Image: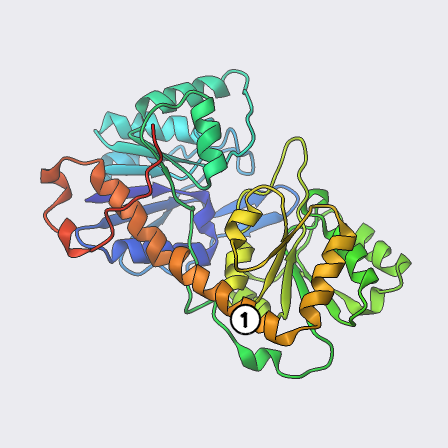
Amino acid sequence: MKILMVSKALVTGVYQKKLEELARLPGVELLAVVPPSWHEERVGVLRLERRYTDGYRLVELPMRFNGHHHIHFYPGLGRVIRDFRPDVLHVDEEPYNLVTFHATLLGRAVGARVVFFTWQNLYRRYPPPFRLFELVNYRLAAAGVAGIQDAAEVLRRKGYRGRLEVIPQFGVDPDLFRPRPELRQPRGLPVIGYAGRLVPEKGVDVLIDAFARLRQRAELHIIGTGIERTRLEMQAGALGVRDRVIFRGAVPAADMPEALAGLDLLVIPSRTRPNWKEQFGRVIVEAMACQVPVIGSDSGEIPNTIGDAGVVVPEGDAAALAAALDDLLGHEAKRAALGRRARQRVLDHFTQRAIAERYYALYRSLLPVGRSGEVWERLPGVGDTGRTPR
């Protein structure tokens, strides 16, 4: 089974681990197309990291309109598709984007079964030509994948009637994101952490407000960059806690496992906006894999990601967040038990291998038996792809 994946997300090295796991599965020949870099708005340039590339080919292709989610595309993609002639073309992009429309037409021209991916968890109607891209992709795709159930429901509401699965985009490597108790040896104050963009919708101002209300003393480490940093530093100063709020800036992806494992608690205080709500919270499962308890707001998918392995508080409620933090900071045994439950939840649902096997099951099911091979029965449990009703 020849699989071609087109994904700008794969510029981040840790995400490539899913492809190594997929390439290890029986009968897979895998080729991935990525740009040399991706320009993320309000974050900066993310350059390609080659970290997990065993067993498959990772090809860089120049991208036009880099940084523009809706209109970017790869001028050289047609040549790659014609040379490789994939059985399955997985376009790891929203169906309303030009790159998906372009890749889908090229893939169908060589007989590939095309799969697209969506995170869109808010219902929106797009103007031409994006609505046209969307409708054509709905008609031509062999399957769609939604990262979360809310996105699947939006896709159905927008008119997609084809095969639909709910599978996260990427999993977590539990050998990389693992407990590191030596990083949390007695060292003075416990460390509360936040990791993500410093933008208004992420609610870091609510976390700083809650931190200033704590009865328990702690440090707050803020990992990430963004347009809100100066305002957040001023807020911490005005609340009298600037000496215990450490702005660590951007941490390279390769260093995130250690950065997260060194925390005593992680807080993701996202707040819903008219044009945004939290889609998944990847850093949540990364911290959970490190056996770090997580407190999250009830924005979007956060409660479903945390499940019963963390604490959920109302978004925007600094008093409720402070109470939850004080409770866990004051009960080390409760914190430890929650951390163990968090790691087990990741092992059960969110590892890179588990996610890769679910995609493998989907890809195989799209092909005639003669093309997908005779090795399906060798992987017990892989056939359950979690398909949602049509």
Q: Is residue 374 left or right of residue 69?
A: left
Which residue is drawn at the image coordinates 46% and 22% (left, top)? 158
Residue 311 in the image: above or below residue 43: below
Q: For the N terminus, which image quadrant?
A: top left
Q: Residue 4's quadrant in the figure? A: top left
Crowd around label 1: few <14 · some 14–19 · many ≥20 (10 Å):
few
Q: Amino acid at mark 1?
A: Ala
Query: Residue 374 versus residue 348: which sits nearer the camera?
Result: 348
Quadrant of the snapshot with the C terminus: top left
- Callout 1 secondary element: helix
Identify the residue at image location x=43%, y=22%. 134
Camera sees residue 97: no
Q: Nearer the viewer, residue 305 or 78?
A: 305
Q: Point out residue 6 in the picture as x, y percentages from the top left corner.
A: 37, 41
Residue 174 in picture, x, y percent from top left:
42, 66
| Residue 156 spot, x, y in % from top left | 43, 25
Residue 186 left/right relative to 24: right
Residue underneath mark 1: 337
For residue 312, side relative to residue 112 (left or right) = right
Q: Is residue 14 above or below residue 79?
A: below
Question: Which residue is at 50% across, 47% downward?
Answer: 37
